[in-house]
Image: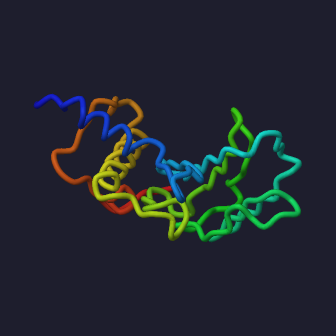
Amino acid sequence: MQEESPELKKLTEKARGRQQFTYEGQVVYEWEQNLDETHIYIKPPPGVTKQHLDIKLEARHVRVGIKGNPPFLNEDTFGLVDLSESFWMIEDGELHLQLQKAHKGEAWGSALKGHGQLDLFSEREVNKKLMLERFQEEHPGFDFSGATFSGEAPSARSFMGGIHH
């Protein structure tokens, strides 16, 4: 097996980790996903606490703002959200929205619609990551941490009959 170059390894880690949505050169939020959830991370302004926040999570929409002001985010989600398992919290100085995917294993191209689609390389790496998570979940006695795909990974949601909840 050929060893990955340091540059490729760094790109792969970046593609599988937090993605940034920027606007006019500023990071608006970061996001990442796994088989079950999509996570959105926002740095609130200094001094803002949970009591200041006005947050509404809906099955296909997210609104985030400070009470008495227009929302900071008011966007549709990329995929359908299971509200019974979704929540938000302030954690390590970040606002963390945890959105439970209604369709387990579905790869989201972005956290919120219209907020930049994953590039092709990142999309393929996310599919690989989700597929490996699925293999690990279905075969807990095996270690897939060093596993790789020799080509494009299939959809974790539909591969071999799909995910069984």
Q: Which quadrant of the view contains residue 72?
A: bottom right
Name the foreground residue: 134 vs 10: 10
Task: Name the residue at 28% across, 30% down.
Answer: 146
Name the foreground residue: 35 vs 120: 120
Is residue 40 shown left or right of residue 108?
right
Compared with residue 126, is residue 69 higher up or lower down, i.e. above or below?
Answer: below
Residue 126, percent across and down? Answer: 37, 50
Q: Which quadrant of the view contains residue 55?
A: bottom right
Is residue 20 shown left or right of residue 68?
left
* Residue 59 seen from this side: no
Task: Name the residue at 72% across, 64% down.
Answer: 63
Compared with residue 48, is residue 76 higher up or lower down, i.e. above or below?
Answer: below
Residue 23, percent across and down? Answer: 54, 59
Task: Name the residue at 60% across, 51% down.
Answer: 40
Residue 127, percent across and down? Answer: 34, 53
Identity of the residue furthest to the left in this view: 1
Name the foreground residue: 143 vs 87: 87
Identity of the residue furthest to the front in this view: 24
Q: Which quadrant of the view contains residue 57?
A: bottom right
* Residue 163 seen from this side: yes
Residue 8, percent across and down? Answer: 24, 37
Compared with residue 7, is residue 81 higher up or lower down, i.e. above or below?
Answer: below
Name the foreground residue: 157 vs 58: 58
Is residue 78 shown left or right of residue 138?
right
Is residue 164 shown left or right of residue 124?
right
